[in-house]
Image: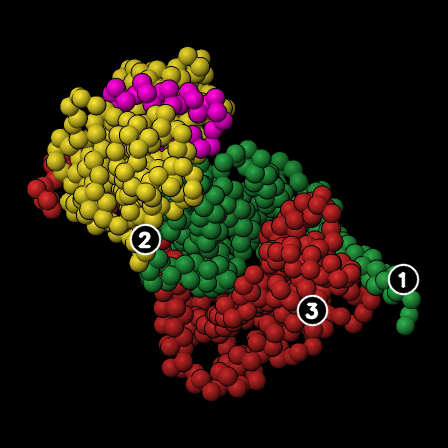
Amino acid sequence: MSEVLTTKAEARKLSFYYGDFRALKGISMSVHERKVTALIGPSGCGKSTFLRCFNRMHDLYPGNRYEGEILLHPDNANLLARGVDPIEVRMRIGMVFQKPNPFPKTVFENVAYGLRVRGESSRRRIEEKVEQSLQDAALWDEVKDRLHQPAYNLSGGQQQRLCIARALATDPELLLFDEPTSALDPIATASIEELMHDLKERVTILIVTHNMQQAARVSDFTAYMYLGDLIEFGVTDELFIKPKMKQTEDYITGRFG
Amino acid sequence: MLGAEIHSQRLARRRSRVIRERLIELALFFAALVSVFTTVGIVYILVKESVAFFQHVPLIDFLTDRQWTPLFDDAHFGIMVLLSGTLTSSAVALAIAIPLGTVIAIYLSEFAPFKLREMAKPLLELLGGVPTIIYGYFALLFVTPLLQRIYPDLPGFNLLSAGIVMGIMIIPYVSSISEDAMRAVPMHLREGSYAMGATRFQTAIKVVVPAAFSGIASAYILGISRAVGETMILAVAAGQQPNLTFNPLEPAATITAYIVQVALGDLPHGSLGYQTIFAAGLTLMLFTLACNIAGHVLRKTFREAY
Amino acid sequence: MKPIKDVIRRRKRWDAIFAVCGLLALMVGVLTFVALFLDMALDGVGRLSWDFFTSFPSRRPGQAGILSAWVGSTLVMLTTAFFAVPLGVAAGVYLEEYAAKNWVTDVIEINITNLAGVPSIVYGLLALGLFVYQFGFGQSILSAGLTLALLILPVVIVATREAIRSIPQAVREGSYALGATQWQTVRYHILPYSSAGILTGVIIGMARAIGETAPVITIGALTFIAFLPPAPVQAEPPFVSFEWLLSPFSVMPIQMFNWTSRPEAAFHANAAAAGFVLVLMTLAMNGLAIWLRYRLRRNIKW
C-alpha cells in the first residue's frame, strides 16, 4: 500500500475490566481512515469487548471499567476521558449489531430515529436523509414503496441493511460492525460485504468477525486477538499469507479455533 | 502526547441536556418514593391516633378486657371481642379456601388439558374481581336463607355465611399463586418421577407440591392476610354486634366491620371514639404485617434452587 | 407379592378420583359465580329502568335511583386515574430503567410488595387521618380519588414493570447506539412498546377501585345523598370548575350497601339492581383487560 494513511482512531494501552475480570490487556492499535479493519480471533478473545469500547456501550451496564485511551482524530480527543459524554461519542460513532435489531416501527421511522434524537424536525430534511441513507445501504429500491410499513416485515438481510441505513443517517465518522452477517444466509451476507466495500469510501469501518474468510474478503487491515491480547496487526493480505506470529499462523491454518 | 487528556469541545457533556436528564430522573424517583411515603403515612397516622387512644385506655385493659362497648358510659375496650369475630370468620374462610384452592391449583397445573386451563384461569380471575359488597349481598340474602333451610335456628346475621362466601372469594388468590409456583417447577423433576413409574397423582403430590412449597405457603399466607382484612362481606352478613365468640353460628363484629360501623356514624375528629378505630386498625395492621413478614421469610428460607 | 398390574390399576384410580375432585372444586367456584350473577339479575333486573339511572335515592324504594351513585363513581374514578396512572407508570419506569441496585431501591420495592397486602380499610384510615383532616381535603371526591389511587398503585407499578421487562435489550442498545439519551429511549421506545401491557394493568386496577367500599366509607362518603356535585363544565367563565373535587358524594358500592342494610325487602331489589350494574361494569373491565392481554401475547413479535 503506497498511499498515505491517516489514523481515524487509536487505542492506546486499552484495558477493560468486567468487575474484577480483565478482559482486555493493554491493547494499542490504529484504525485507519476510510479503510476496513477487521478483528478476528477465537470465542472469548475480547474482540466484541474491544469494539464496544469505541462507542462506550459498556457504560450502559454497571461494574465495568476502562483503562488507557481511545483517541479520536482529527480532534485528538480521548473518548474514555472523564468529561466526555458517551452520548456525544455515539453521535459520531455508529454501530451495527450481530442480530438485526430494527425497532418495532415503520421502515421510515427506523431510519429517521437518529435524526429525531438529534432534534432534527424539518420534515423535508428528514425525508431527504432517509432516502439518501437507504440508497447508501443499497436498500432504497426494495423498500421505497414500503416506507411506512413495519420494519419487521422485511427479510433478515433487508433488516440488517435497514440497521446499516439507520446508522448511516447520522453521518458517523466511524462505523462499528459487530459480527453483522453471522445471523444471515450466504446471499444476504454477500450483499452486506459488497455494501461495506462501497461504504468505506465514505466512512471508516471496524468490523468484528468470527469468519476468517470474511475478514480476508472485506478488510484492508486485520488484527488477531487472543484471550484479551492483540497478537498481531497488519495489512490483511500480508497477515493471511505470511503471518509474523506463530499464534496467528496456528489460528489461521485452523490448528485451533 | 501519551496520556494526554485533551478532550475536544465536541465530545464534552452538554450542560442543558445533562440537567434535563437529571431532572427527569429525579421526578421519576419521587414517583417511586410515593410508596414509601404511603407506608410512612400509614404508620404515622395509626401510631399517632393510637397513642392518643392509649392515654385514655390502658394497654392491659385493651388486651384483656372481655367486653367491647366503646360508646357506653361505662366503656370497655377489649380488642379480644373483635378479634374473636375476625379469627372465627377467617378460620371458616380458610377452611374452604385452602383445600379447594390447593386442589384447583394442583388440578390445573398437573392434570387439566391446556384448553381447560386457559378457560379456567380467566374465570377464576373474574371470580376474584367481583366487588366484595356484592359478595356481602350474596351472603346475607342467598347463602343465609339457604343455610337456614338446613339449620333453621341460624340467625339472620352469622359468621358462617360470611365465612363461606369469603372463603370462595379467596380461592382465586390461593389457587393462582400456588399454580404459578407449581408451574415453575421444571419438567425434569417430573420426568424423574414418571420415569420410575409413578402416576400423575403421585408425581403431583410427592414431587411437585413439595418442590413448590415456598410458593404455596406464601399463597396460604396471602389468603390469611386477605381473610383477616376483609370488610364488607362481614359488615353486611355477620352483623355489627360485638360478640366474644368462636362459634360461627352466631353473629359477631370483626375489627374491620367495627371500623366501618363507626365511620358510618358521626364521630367528631379527636374524640375517643374516633381514636378507637385507629387503635383497632393498628391491631389489624400489625397482624397483616406479621403475615407479610412470615411469607417473606418463608420464601427466602425455602427458595428452592433448581 | 401382589400382581403389579393390580397395584398400578389401583394407583391409577387415584388419578381419576383426583381429576374429578379438581373439576368439582372448580365447579364450586364457577357455580358460585353463576349463582351470584343470577341472584343479582333475577332480583334486580325488574328495577332497571331509565328512571332508576336518573333518580336520586329516596325513602320510598320504588322511586329510588342510582344517579348520585354512578355520577359519584365516575368522578371518583377520573380522579383516581388522574393520580394513579402517572405516578404508577413513572415509578415503574424508574425502577426498571433508572434505579441502581442499592438499598434505596430495595426499600422502595419492599414497600410496594408490602402495600399490595395491606387491607383496603387501612387505606381508608390513612385517608381519614391524613387527607380528610390533616391536609384538609375534607370528606370529598378528592380524598376518595387519592385514597383509591394509592390503593391501586402497586397494581399499576407491577403491570408497568412487567410490560417494560418484556422489551428485549437489543432494542435499547439500538437506541443508545444512535446517540439517544436515557429519557429519549424511554419516551420513544420503552413507553410506546409497553403501553398495551400498562393499559391492561390500569384497567385491572380501575376495575378494583370501582368496587371498593370500605376505604370510601371510612373517609366519610355519604350513604344517602340527594344532590350531585357541581358540574366540572359550566356555562359561565372560567368554564371549567374544580369545585366538584371538594364536594360530598356517594359511590355505587356504598349505595348498594345502604340498600342492603335496610330491612325492607323492596330496598333489597334496588340493591340487587345496583349490584347487577356494578357486576356488569366490573366484568366488562376485567374482560377487556383479559382480552387485551390475550391480544398482546399474539401480536408482539420480539
Q: Which residue is mark 3?
A: B95
Front-lying residue, C217 or A246: A246
| Amino acid, disc 1 | Lys
Binning the other alpha carbons within 10 Å of mark 3 as few (below 14), some (14 to 19) or many (20 upward) gives some
Q: Which residue is mark 2?
A: A18
User: Is C67 colored magenta in this rendering?
Assistant: no
* Rendered residue at 35%/57% (across/down): C101
Front-lying residue, C206 or B135: C206
Chain hosting mark 2? A
| Amino acid, disc 2 | Tyr
| Residue B274 image offset from top left, x and y in percent | 43, 70
Q: Is residue B106 left or right of residue A7?
A: right
Q: Which residue is mark 1?
A: C5
| Residue B112 image offset from top left, x and y in percent | 73, 51
- Same chain shared by disc 3 and disc 2: no
Range of the magenta residues? A177-203
Dot 2: what SS? strand
According to the rendering, which colour does chain C have? green
* Rendered residue at 15%/23% (across/down): A4
User: Is A188 colored magenta in this rendering?
Assistant: yes
* Rendered residue at 50%/77% (across/down): B70
Q: Quadrant of residue A167?
A: top left
Dot 1: what SS? helix
Q: Quadrant of residue B213?
A: bottom right
Q: Is residue C257 left or right of residue A156?
A: right
| Residue B220 image offset from top left, x and y in percent | 61, 66
Distance of label 1 from label 3 (alpha carbons): 37 Å
Total number of numbered discs in the rendering = 3
According to the rendering, which colour does chain B have? red
Distance of label 2 from label 1 (alpha carbons): 60 Å
Binning the other alpha carbons within 10 Å of mark 1 as few (below 14), some (14 to 19) or many (20 upward) gives few
